[in-house]
Image: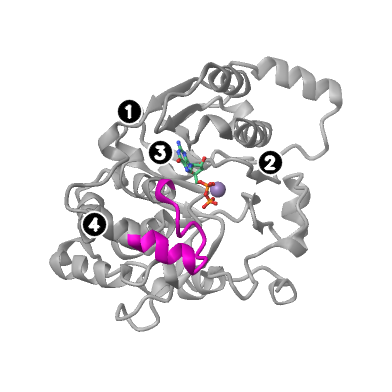
């Protein structure tokens, strides 16, 4: 980082110089967004924040996926905002529909019951297809096949700090496969039998479960029960090759067979998180403290003042979620014997 702030003239010159012409070498990676045409203005905000804080210096590609065709308005606006190359893909029908072994009447009854109980998205059919798609399919869409890493971006997110080093490069050079900025407890009603399903998978595939995994993050009793901790998957930077590996596909297929994406409301966040925690080595999972992030209703904001000044952050440290009671990041630090930042105990 420059020691003093560049002048407006310097800044403008630098920006003109880098426009449409990456000044930094890229790794083989892309942003990826699942969206509907109606998400246009909310995704525009997200793209703007990602470009301003990072991608204008790198010009990484951006892949947009949809269960329908994107319309021209969506494509024009997003292409104008993204500094890299944009790609638009339609999701194949069989990746966004019921597998033949699902009893659709039973699924409908489950939705009605969860709707009566006022469980968030409990009555929604499309939300379930979305969660199943993000859990098992986005990384094998033809447009994604040539990339090694992805960064998932949802509508209406915010980034609050400059991203001064390329997170994709960091992942690649350090052998990281999955990363997060916010973690929390899952709403039990959405996943009552998920852990049974995971245990069945682990029994059938002990060869996929390395001893050095992060089981301690998601279980307090060595894997007997799930403590509901998960990484919040609306932000993810991860390895596509890991998601396309035999281990991950065996895991997803086994869970999918059990039907909980439809008979319950399994989210892609616990599904990805559990996979990472049981099948990766602990050190392959990374917490990006420097990526300050908001997705309604939670914020990750570095509480270290020097970090915030160096990275020109504009988030309020009091809003940082990491050390609040409903966050699991405390547990992540504990099981990894990581040192918490000064003042963490005053930040809850
Ligand atoms: P939440 O963050 O859990 O409240 O869920 P969102 O409404 O943000 O949905 C998660 C992601 O999936 C976002 O990127 C949405 O744009 C996308 N999404 C949700 N439902 C659909 C859908 O039916 N079709 C498409 N194409 N995208 C969807
Ligand atoms: Mn969202």
Query: Is residue 302 shown to the viewer in this render?
Result: yes
Q: Which residue is mark 2?
A: 162
Element on which disc 4 rests: helix
* Lateral position of residue 98 relative to residue 319, left or right: left
Residue 280 part of the magenta-drawn span: no
Element on which disc 1 rests: loop
Instruction: Please tell me which residue lies in front, 55 or 133.
Output: 133
Q: In the image, which disc is placed on residue 146? A: 1
Q: Nearer the viewer, mark 1 or mark 4?
A: 4
> 10 Å neighbourhood of mark 4: few (<14), some, or many (≥20)?
many
Rounded to the nearest whole Å, what is the CA distance between mark 4 and mark 2? 36 Å
Return the x and y of residue 316 as percentages of the image width and height: 78, 57
Are the residues flagged by discs 1 and 2 in contact, CB closer than 8 Å? Answer: no
Q: Which residue is mark 3?
A: 149
Q: Nearer the viewer, mark 3 or mark 4?
A: 4
Q: Which residue is mark 4?
A: 251
Does 168 appear above or below 199? above
Does 108 appear above or below 238? below
Are the residues flagged by discs 4 and 2 in contact, CB closer than 8 Å? Answer: no
Mark with earlier residue (2, 3): 3
Residue 110 part of the magenta-drawn span: yes
């Amino acid at each position: 980082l420059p020691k003093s702030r560049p002048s407006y003239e310097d800044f403008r010159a630098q920006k003109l110089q880098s426009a449409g012409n990456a000044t930094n070498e890229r790794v083989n990676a892309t942003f990826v967004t699942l969206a509907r045409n109606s998400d246009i203005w909310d995704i525009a905000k997200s793209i703007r924040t990602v470009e301003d804080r990072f991608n204008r210096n790198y010009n990484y590609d951006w892949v947009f996926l949809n269960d329908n065709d994107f319309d021209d308005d969506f494509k024009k606006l997003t292409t104008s905002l993204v500094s890299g190359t944009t790609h638009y893909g339609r999701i194949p029908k069989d990746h966004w529909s019921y597998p033949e072994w699902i009893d659709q009447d039973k699924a409908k009854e489950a939705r009605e019951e969860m709707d009566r109980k006022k469980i968030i998205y409990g009555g929604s059919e499309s939300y379930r297809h979305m969660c199943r798609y993000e859990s098992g399919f986005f990384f094998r869409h033809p447009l994604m096949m040539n990339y090694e890493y992805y960064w998932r971006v949802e509508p209406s997110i915010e980034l609050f700090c400059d991203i001064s080093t390329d997170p994709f490069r960091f992942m690649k050079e350090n052998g990281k496969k999955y990363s997060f900025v916010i973690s929390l407890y899952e709403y039990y009603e959405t996943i009552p039998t998920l852990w049974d399903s995971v245990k069945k998978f682990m029994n059938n595939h002990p060869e996929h479960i390395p001893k050095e995994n992060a089981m301690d993050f998601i279980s307090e009793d060595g894997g007997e029960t799930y403590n509901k901790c998960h990484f919040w998957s609306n932000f993810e930077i991860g390895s596509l090759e890991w998601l396309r590996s035999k281990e991950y596909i065996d895991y997803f297929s086994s869970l999918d067979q059990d039907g909980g994406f439809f008979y319950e409301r399994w989210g892609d966040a616990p599904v990805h998180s559990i996979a990472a925690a049981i099948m990766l080595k602990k050190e392959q999972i990374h917490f990006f403290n420097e990526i300050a992030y908001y997705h309604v209703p939670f914020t990750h904001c570095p509480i270290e003042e020097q970090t915030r000044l160096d990275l020109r952050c504009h988030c309020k440290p009091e809003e940082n979620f990491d050390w609040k009671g409903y966050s699991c990041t405390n547990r992540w630090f504990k099981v990894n014997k990581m040192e918490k930042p000064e003042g963490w105990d005053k930040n809850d």
